[in-house]
Image (cartoon, rainbow, N blue to C red):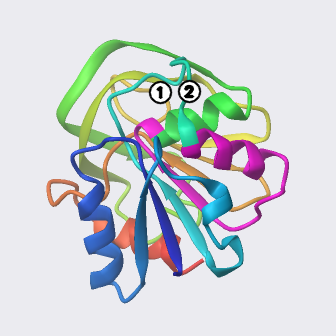
Amino acid sequence: MSTLIVDHGSQYTHLIKRNCRDLGYDAEIVNSKTGKLSEINITEIKKIILSGGPSSVYANSNGLGEEIAKKVATSEIKVPILGICFGHQLLAHVFGGKVEKGKSAEYGLSRITIDDEDLLLSGIPKEFNAWTSHFDEVNELPKKFIALAHSDSCKYEAMRHETRNIFGLQFHPEVWHTEHGEQILKNFLEL
């Protein structure tokens, strides 16, 4: 297994796996509620993707996804990690950022503006359309994270850790509605 995809109940999780496969990378989906880190051979994992989902980071338990995020935060797991939508919020929350209800829910296409293309958004036009589907959003970045992109209604559409390969996207690069989404996933998978 090269890429572990932790499913938080997103209707798009299977598209993440399909994109990985289409780009030439093996991937396996594990359910965050039922998956156990003790049953995963962590030495075989080269990348981790935390999917979106309908929950809140303030729910009682965010299962395997939160367990992995905490181990990434303490450097027990050091492979590149990408959080998408809920996964983005979960990473921000675990690393000490603030997640709250957005001023307005985003559902549908949003115009994304890149502030810092960095590795994740390399080769992507400064502005592009992306599929968004969320009520909560990151309102305060964790320490040592930088903003990579924003939209009119969301301040942090993309973020990354200053020195580690830890990334978050509020939008969904895996759906065909998102322009250049495959390139964004490719940039991550090639790290």
Q: Which residue is mark 2?
A: 61
Amino acid type, label 2: Ser
**Depicted 67 relative to depicted 164: above or below:** above
**Where residue 144 appears, x then y in whole percent?**
79, 41
Between disc 2 and disc 1, the foreground one is 2
Residue 152 position, x and y percent, is: 33, 26
Q: Look at label 1 and name its amino acid.
A: Lys
Q: Secondary structure at mark 1?
A: loop
Q: Decide if residue 149 is in sight here.
A: no
Within 10 Å of the Cα at label 1, are there few (<14), some (14-19), or many (20+) other Cα atoms? Answer: some
As for residue 73 lying within the magenta part, the answer is yes
Q: Magenta span covers which residues? A: 64-86
- How many C-alpha atoms fall within 10 Å of the one at disc 2: few (<14), some, or many (≥20)? some
Vertical side of 13 occupied by 33: above or below: above
Question: In this view of the protein, which residue sits in the foreground, 82 or 143?
Answer: 82
In screen coordinates, is 142 left or right of 49?
right
Quarter of the rendering containing residue 142:
top right
Which residue lies at the image location 71% right of the left edge and 49% below the top edge? Answer: 161
Mark 2 or mark 1, earlier in chain: 2
Residue with the mark numbered 1 = 155
Q: Nearer the viewer, residue 68 or 137?
A: 68
Q: Nearer the viewer, residue 140 or 100?
A: 100
> Can you give x and y, in whole percent of width and height, for residue 3 in the image?
50, 73
Asked whether residue 31 is in view, the answer is: yes
Could you tell whether 141 is left or right of 35 in the image? right
